[in-house]
Amino acid sequence: MIRSVECKDALVPFTGNAFACRIRATANAYGFIHPFARFWVQARQAAMCLLDDAMILDAHPDADFDELAEFFPAVGARILLCSEAAAHSLPFPWKQTGEVMTLHAPQPFKGEGIVWNPSPRLLYPLLCACQAAQFQPPAFEPFYLDLSHRTRHGTACSAAIQEGNSLVACAICSAWTEDAAVLSAVAVQPEARRRGLGTNIVRTLATSLPAKTFYIFRAAGENEEFYQSLGFTRHCGFAELSLQERDAL
């Protein structure tokens, strides 16, 4: 049975993966009073977070996926992010797939010339400069509002390297809790690549946070060697599903 969550304690059992980290960090940032940020649990088998129309699911193998499949569209969710294993149990078409990679206990590293938590207005042009087939920058306004809010509430952190008057590299952690963090973006200006800036900024950000486990969501076929060189290893597959239509399982 699915029930609404109104306090953080209900989410404590959910840990040990990137989806749980994102759900709990969102609860820490937004609390339980906003109509655009809602949370539910299905006993101890699944936890869910709906932010605007995007749902994140952390589901155990014994979750009631039939109930979940009926529930998601009913509460207004349009897209779903979950593990590949959970996606196989749901009757919705897949939009995107990729790999969650993890890094445990990164080695201490201190970069030089680091700008901490620069304004999202400064980060956004750097993200746009790195646009590619597998990476489309988010819309500016929701990116700005969400990252600013999470940073103010201590559940997000960003670091950048500045040269002259502009940022040339950045790393953004959009969700972190006491035990885990999710690295959501790494960007280096095209003309500044092959200088180790991406490696330096990721290591600097990772060792600045108290979390001992770090996750990244890597699109299929993208940047695998880069993250492996930093010590990241495969954790699981992920899938983004469209909840506007159903497949026949």
Image (tube, helix red, strand yellow):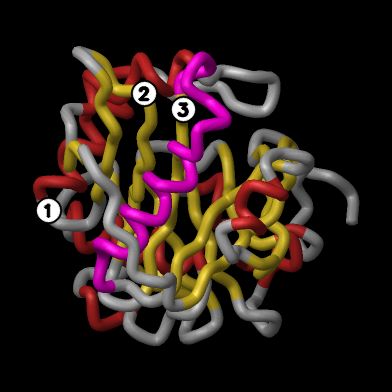
Label 1 residue SS: loop
> Which residues fall within the magenta stretch?
189-210
Label 3 residue SS: strand
Is residue 36 or residue 123 the one in the foreground? 123
Kindly identify which residue carries mark 1.
Answer: 153
Based on the picture, tell me whether residue 193 belongs to the magenta stretch.
yes
Q: Residues within 10 Å of mark 2 (few under 14, many from 20)?
A: many
Marks 3/1 in contact by CB < 8 Å: the verdict is: no
Q: Position of residue 64 (x, y in %)?
A: 65, 76
Q: Horizontal placement of 124 versus 84: left or right?
A: left
Where on the picture, by quarter, is residue 105? Answer: bottom left
Q: Between disc 2 and disc 3, whose residue precedes?
A: 2
Q: Nearer the viewer, mark 2 or mark 1?
A: 2
Q: Residues within 10 Å of mark 3 (few under 14, many from 20)?
A: many
Q: Is residue 142 above or below residue 184?
A: above
Q: Position of residue 106 (x, y in %)?
A: 43, 71
Q: Main secondary structure of the magenta part?
A: helix
What amino acid does circle 3 point to?
A: Val
| Outermost residue toward the right in this view | 249
Q: Position of residue 41 (x, y in %)?
A: 43, 73
Kindly identify which residue carries mark 2.
Answer: 168
Q: CA distance from mark 2 to mark 3?
A: 6 Å
Kindly identify which residue carries mark 3.
Answer: 188
Q: Between disc 3 and disc 1, whose residue precedes?
A: 1
Q: Residues within 10 Å of mark 1 (few under 14, many from 20)?
A: few
Residue drawn 80% across the image and 61% down it = 88
Residue 52 can be seen in this image: yes
Q: CA distance from mark 3 to mark 1?
A: 26 Å
Q: CA distance from mark 2 to mark 1?
A: 26 Å
Residue 1 can be seen in this image: no
Q: Is residue 226 above or below residue 42?
A: above
Q: Horizontal placement of 138 versus 81: left or right?
A: left
